[in-house]
Amino acid sequence: RWSTEMLSGYGYPFFLFYGNGSFFFSEFIRFVGSGFSTATFCSDAFIQPLSTANPYQDSIMSVNQAWNIMTFLSYLLSGIGMYFLMKQFVTKIPAFCAALIFIFFPYHIGEIFMRGDVAEALAAYTCVVWAFYFAVRFIREQNLKFLIFSAAFLAATIFTHTVSGLMWLPIFALFTFWFSWSEQVPKKVYGWLLIGGLLSLALAAFYFLPAMLEKEFVHVERLFNSPFLPEIHRNNNIL
């Protein structure tokens, strides 16, 4: 979690406080695209000096290619997820229109093509949509596999972009309990929803618990004390 090459070689706890999900997903794509031989070089890089190890030699897929593929898949899957979610409530044509509006929403486009914040787009526009979709399926069909999928996508939201996770958690909880009430489901469904929420937190605990326990060793307040919002992006050194 300590990035030794950052901050002019002094190191920086980047991956301790910034969501890791997008990096893991893109690395998985690179691993699959490059084959097992590349993975061997990557593992060797951890025990060799940086000057001698070349984790990308003989690589079929570069890091940039994997990142671009992940960005495209995130954009595509967000629209597909919205289509399936809306199809639970409306017919095919309105659901398709909702999906188009969703993927071409200005903020969504700006996140990817202007800010390049793929982590937030992946969390807030892809993982969250699928979490809602599987939650609706669980409430209506009461099949536990849908609850597990929903919890996994909700955990992925936290793991990928913490702020998005914190923002969507209360909204997700209110929606699921309201929708359960509107569907007049048995009382046991509320208990399973609570278990699902705890499961999502447990799945993401390996990331957010160390960050919470070790935040006293850095200056997190520097991220919030700036009087001007644009300054936050220039004064975000927390060491």
Image (cartoon, grey):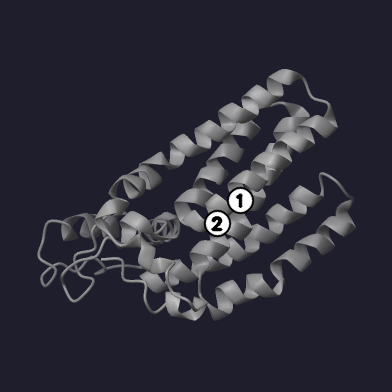
Label 2 amino acid?
Answer: Ser
**Which residue is at 53% across, 40% downward?**
152
As drawn, the label of residue 80 is: none
Residue appearing at x 77%, y 66% in the figure: 100
Q: Which residue is mark 2?
A: 164
Kind of residue sitting beneath label 1: Trp
| Front-lying residue, 69 or 200 | 200
The image quarter in which residue 48 lies: bottom left
- At a point 17% along the width and 57% down the height, the residue shown is 46
Residue 117, percent from left and from top: 51, 70
Q: From the top left corner, tell me how far across and down residue 126 is, in percent.
A: 61, 56
Residue 60 visible to the viewer: yes
Residue 235: image x %, image y %? 37, 76
Residue 168, numbered circle = 1
Q: Is residue 123 above or below residue 69?
A: above
The quarter holding residue 188 reads top right
Are there few (<14), some (14-19), or many (20+) residues within 10 Å of tag 1? some
> In the rendered image, is residue 144 in sight?
no
Mark 2 falls on what kind of element? helix
Location of the N terminus (image quadrant)? bottom left
| Residue 56 in picture, x, y percent from top left | 26, 68
Q: From the image, which quarter does the C terminus lie in?
A: bottom left
Question: Quick check: marks 1 and 2 in contact, CB under 8 Å?
Answer: yes
